[in-house]
Amino acid sequence: MSKAPSPAEAERERRLADALRANLRKRKAKVREAKAEIPAKE
């Protein structure tokens, strides 16, 4: 698969990457929220 991806495939990959980044941001925010609620025991 050395040929360039078709425009449809490139668009799908771009949307997938955007969705993954958004998902990661949401997960990180959720973790930060959980940490704020439960003080770390150190």
Image (spheres, helix red, strand yellow):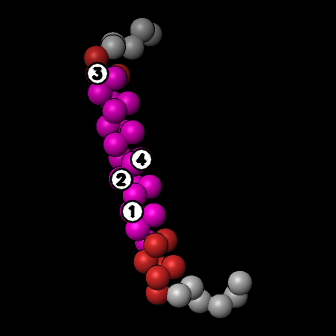
Give the residue at x 33% y 13%: 39
Tell me, yes or no, whether the highlighted magenta stretch contains residue 26: yes
| Position of residue 1 in the picture relative to residue 35 (left or right) | right
Secondary structure, mark 4, is helix
Q: Which residue is mark 4?
A: 24
For the residues labelled 1 and 2, say whether their Cβ atoms are less than 8 Å apart.
yes
Over which residues does the magenta segment extend? 14-34
Specify whether residue 28 is painted magenta: yes
**Reading the chain from its start, which is encountered first: label 1 or label 4?**
1
Task: Looking at the image, tell me whether mark 3 or mark 1 is earlier in sequence order.
Answer: 1
Q: What residue is disc 1 on?
A: 18
Circles 4 and 2 in contact, beta carbons < 8 Å: yes
Label 1 and label 4: CA atoms lie apart by 10 Å
Q: Amino acid at mark 4?
A: Leu
> Alpha-carbon distance for marks 4 and 3?
18 Å
Q: Which label is found at residue 36?
A: 3
